């Protein structure tokens, strides 16, 4: 069963990840009354980009050249940390949630350096906004992880997933607060409305798209894949840590698949119903998420004392 | 609606006053004191005998101050009295070689110079930088370059640079017959084709001594309102797209498409091209009028329900208030027109002073409930004008429109007409030669008048809000690049 978990972890992360944003886009188009692309569209995009040569703006240095590989490598490592259906193969990396936070931050950092390297206004603006948001998004992610870690008394993702299983956690207010706060984490990390508009072509409003503007070909393919893999990581985590799941490995695998579909539909519905926020209000929303997680934390601590 | 002007000379009268250079500024001030509103200035001719004409609107009348500019002479500027004349003076400098005395700078407008510093306003300070957008944009947008002077995410100043696709249409039309010139006026812009053509046709008729009869006036008003209908629907859809609100965007884009198809059914062209003629109007049979009324009634009901949904979309409404504010004082000083001016609380709508068209004496400019001059108010003006336009269309189509013609009237070698386009007052001035050929055609569209106001309203806003502010004005590039 661990072997199956390993298979889902690696193949799922590498090969199935693009299906998630593809599904969201496809569902969103239906909700908006358009025919829209097929859920397989991201694969076509990746194949197209992979067949093209990369272009380097001048003058750029090694930072710009290495950034896509660094981002992709950090994302692959992050993938290997996330357990599947409560199981995690031993890659000698451990499954520490804090390492995962660090790896996601590393990807963001590498891309920001590359934006700085190009000196392009739009890339810099995008990563400037991304880094500003990160000031609020990273504490939010950390706090929700702490909320999930308390019942497990560990930041090991396998233990956290096990502690979140069954019906027990749903009697705790902390779990509800954590789940609501993690919903915000999903919106921020996947770069979706109301935080960011993934469909925009308006350079002035871009956040996550901005740093990608200068890249082409295989570099862009790596970055696009990494963005899709980030969808996979946060959505799998959302199901594993805050989604309902019962039973043994196979049941949990079923719950995971179901959870991913439901979350994709929820993302599509949110993007359809919500306009993009004014940019300076997004940190407020994330701060609200942090407050919610803190309330959960306090309730867990008080509950623990009583 | 009961148009009060059924009598003979139903058209905008133009009165020309020749002014000497010394008295130019005083004459312009005098016009303002008399209640005149600056609505454009243009140069005529080259070398000796050049003239510089300024137009002032006063109710239904238009007055023209005309100044003869000798060789090597400079025109006293009026830009300090009338900031709205800035573009007119800069354009005349670029295209007609006119010099203006008393201006601090005459930055190139139409002529594109290489050095950025030559056409931008210098902005300096700690942490200020420039962001350049365009002229090539992602998406289907015309060519325009926007240079933002920014500190952090806040815009300090915006220098727009248009005229990338300046086609010299006005110059090309010179020497043609008035009928042939219609094609040039129409092709200035796709989305304002009717407004531009009607303004041109009215100006030509004034110069030729023709007065459009009742049927022609009704037909032209029908076309103008059909154009406003699809433009307003489009503008609302664009504002929804600007905040990433897909349901609103899709709903209004679909309504716009329906309006375009109705246009095609009625006249054979989605954008109503080729429907305006000098001394004639379009004909609409009773059957067509009935069919169109029915279709428009359905469209109106759907538009009303889409508008209601948009009004209750909290995430959209949260984006609109306090963004891109154009105060009433600034709007008046910069000569803003159309929905942009009305959103700021200025009751200015050319339709209430258009005797050459079929708007009743009871026509009143639309007023938003809260004339705050922001994106929300500009959206609301369109929301208020949509039902009014649909109602006008119903009244116009209540009876068939016969083949329009024209009656003889007083001729004047200079004809000026003002027409309310979806984006504001469009002014067309036509001067004919003795041989009744076009000597000079000047088209100053609502977009042209509003571009400086847009740039002004952008200052002190956040950079990511600019696309939204831009879409709330929804100005044409082609109308300026004529």
Image: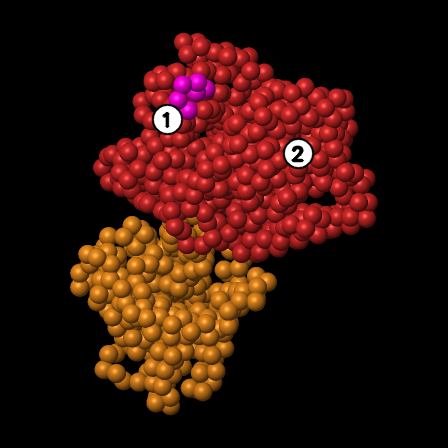
Chain colours: A orange, B red
- Between residue A154 and residue A243, name the one nearer to us: A243
- Between residue B64 and residue B406, name the one nearer to us: B406
Q: Position of residue B5 (x, y in %)?
A: 74, 23
Image quarter hosting the C terminus of chain A: bottom left
In the drawing, what numbered circle is on residue A187? none
Badge 2: chain ID = B
Q: Residue at x 71, y 37 (%)?
A: B281
Q: Which residues are magenta?
A: B46-51
Relative to B323, say whether B74 is above or below: above
**In the figure, residue A190 lies in which quadrant?**
bottom left
Q: Position of residue B171 (x, y in %)?
A: 47, 34
Relative to A231, say whether A113 is above or below: above
- In this rendering, does residue B160 appear at all? yes
Image quarter hosting the N terminus of chain A: bottom left
- In this rendering, does residue A155 appear at all? no
Q: Position of residue A247 (x, y in %)?
A: 46, 84
Relative to A95, say whether B351 is above or below: above
Left/right placement of residue B328 relative to residue A160 reads right
Left/right placement of residue B341 relative to residue A4 reads right
Tag 2 residue: B278
Left/right placement of residue A162 relative to residue B204 reads left
- Between residue B98 and residue B424, name the one nearer to us: B98
Residue farthest along the left direction in this orientation: A62
Label 2 or label 1, whichever comes before in sequence order: 1
Tag 1 residue: B97
Q: CA distance from mark 2 to mark 1?
A: 32 Å
């Amino acid at each position: 069963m661990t072997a199956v978990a390993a298979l889902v972890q690696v193949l799922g992360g590498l090969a199935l990840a693009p299906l998630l944003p593809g599904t969201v886009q496809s569902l969103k188009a239906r909700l908006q009354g358009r025919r829209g692309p097929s859920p397989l569209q991201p694969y076509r995009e990746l194949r197209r980009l992979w067949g093209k040569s990369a272009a380097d703006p001048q003058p750029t240095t090694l930072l710009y050249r290495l950034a896509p590989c660094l981002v992709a490598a950090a994302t692959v490592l992050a993938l290997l940390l996330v357990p599947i259906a409560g199981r995690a193969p031993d890659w000698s990396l451990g499954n520490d949630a804090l390492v995962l936070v660090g790896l996601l931050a590393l990807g963001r950092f590498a891309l920001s350096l590359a934006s700085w390297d190009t000196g392009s206004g739009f890339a810099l603006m995008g990563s400037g906004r991304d880094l500003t948001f990160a000031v609020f998004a990273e504490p939010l992610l950390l706090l929700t992880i702490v909320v999930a870690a308390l019942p497990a008394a560990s930041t090991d993702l396998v233990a956290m997933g096990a502690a979140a299983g069954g019906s027990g956690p749903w009697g705790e207010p902390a779990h509800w607060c954590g789940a609501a706060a993690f919903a915000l984490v999903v919106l921020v990390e996947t770069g979706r409305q109301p935080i960011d508009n993934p469909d925009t072509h308006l350079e002035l409003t871009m956040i996550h798209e901005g740093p990608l503007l200068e890249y082409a070909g295989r570099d862009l393919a790596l970055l696009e894949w990494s963005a899709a893999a980030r969808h996979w990581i946060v959505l799998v985590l959302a199901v594993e840590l805050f989604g309902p799941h019962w039973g043994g490995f196979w049941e949990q695998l079923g719950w995971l698949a179901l959870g991913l579909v439901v979350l994709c539909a929820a993302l599509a519905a949110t993007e359809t119903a919500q306009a993009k926020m004014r940019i300076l209000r997004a940190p407020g929303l994330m701060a609200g998420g942090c407050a919610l997680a803190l309330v959960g934390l306090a309730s867990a601590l008080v509950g623990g004392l009583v | 609606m009961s148009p009060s002007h059924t009598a003979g000379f139903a058209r905008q009268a133009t009165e020309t006053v020749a002014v000497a250079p010394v008295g130019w500024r005083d004459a312009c001030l005098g016009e303002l004191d008399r209640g005149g509103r600056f609505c454009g200035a243009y140069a005529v001719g080259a070398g000796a005998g050049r003239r510089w004409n300024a137009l002032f609107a006063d109710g239904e009348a238009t007055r023209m101050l005309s100044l003869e500019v000798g060789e090597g002479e400079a025109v006293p500027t009026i830009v300090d009295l009338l900031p709205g004349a800035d573009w007119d003076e800069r354009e005349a400098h670029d295209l007609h070689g006119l010099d203006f005395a008393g201006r601090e700078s005459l930055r190139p407008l139409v002529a594109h110079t290489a050095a950025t510093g030559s056409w931008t306003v210098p902005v300096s300070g700690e942490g200020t930088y420039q962001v350049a957008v365009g002229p090539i944009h992602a998406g289907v947008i015309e060519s325009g370059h926007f240079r933002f002077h920014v500190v952090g995410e806040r815009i300090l100043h915006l220098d727009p640079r248009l005229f990338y696709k300046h086609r010299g249409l006005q110059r090309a039309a010179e020497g043609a017959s008035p009928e042939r010139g219609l094609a040039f006026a129409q092709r200035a812009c796709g989305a304002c084709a009717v407004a531009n053509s009607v303004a041109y046709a009215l100006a030509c008729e004034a110069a030729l001594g023709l007065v459009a009869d009742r049927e022609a006036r009704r037909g032209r008003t029908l076309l103008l309102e059909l154009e406003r209908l699809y433009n307003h629907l489009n503008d609302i859809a664009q504002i929804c797209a600007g905040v990433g609100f897909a349901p609103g965007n899709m709903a209004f884009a679909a309504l716009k498409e329906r309006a375009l198809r109705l246009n095609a059914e009625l006249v054979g062209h989605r954008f109503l091209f080729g429907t305006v003629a000098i001394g004639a109007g379009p004909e609409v049979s009773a059957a067509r009028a009935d069919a169109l009324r029915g279709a428009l009634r359905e469209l109106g009901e759907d538009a009303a329900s889409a508008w209601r949904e948009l009004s209750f979309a909290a995430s959209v409404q949260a984006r609109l208030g306090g963004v891109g504010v154009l105060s009433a004082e600034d709007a008046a000083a910069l000569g803003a027109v159309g929905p942009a001016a009305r959103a700021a609380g200025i009751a200015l709508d050319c339709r209430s002073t258009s005797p050459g068209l079929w708007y009743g004496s009871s026509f009143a400019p639309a007023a938003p409930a809260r004339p705050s001059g922001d994106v929300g108010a500009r959206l609301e003006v369109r929301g208020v004008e949509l039902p009014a336009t649909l109602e006008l269309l119903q009244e116009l189509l209540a009876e068939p429109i016969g083949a329009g013609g024209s009656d003889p009237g007083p001729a004047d070698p200079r004809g000026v007409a003002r027409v309310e386009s979806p984006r504001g007052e469009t002014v067309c001035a036509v001067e004919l030669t003795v041989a009744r050929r076009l000597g000079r055609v000047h088209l100053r569209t609502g977009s042209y008048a509003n571009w400086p106001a847009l740039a002004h309203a952008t200052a002190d806003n956040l950079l990511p809000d600019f696309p939204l502010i831009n879409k709330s004005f929804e100005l044409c590039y082609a109308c300026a690049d004529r």
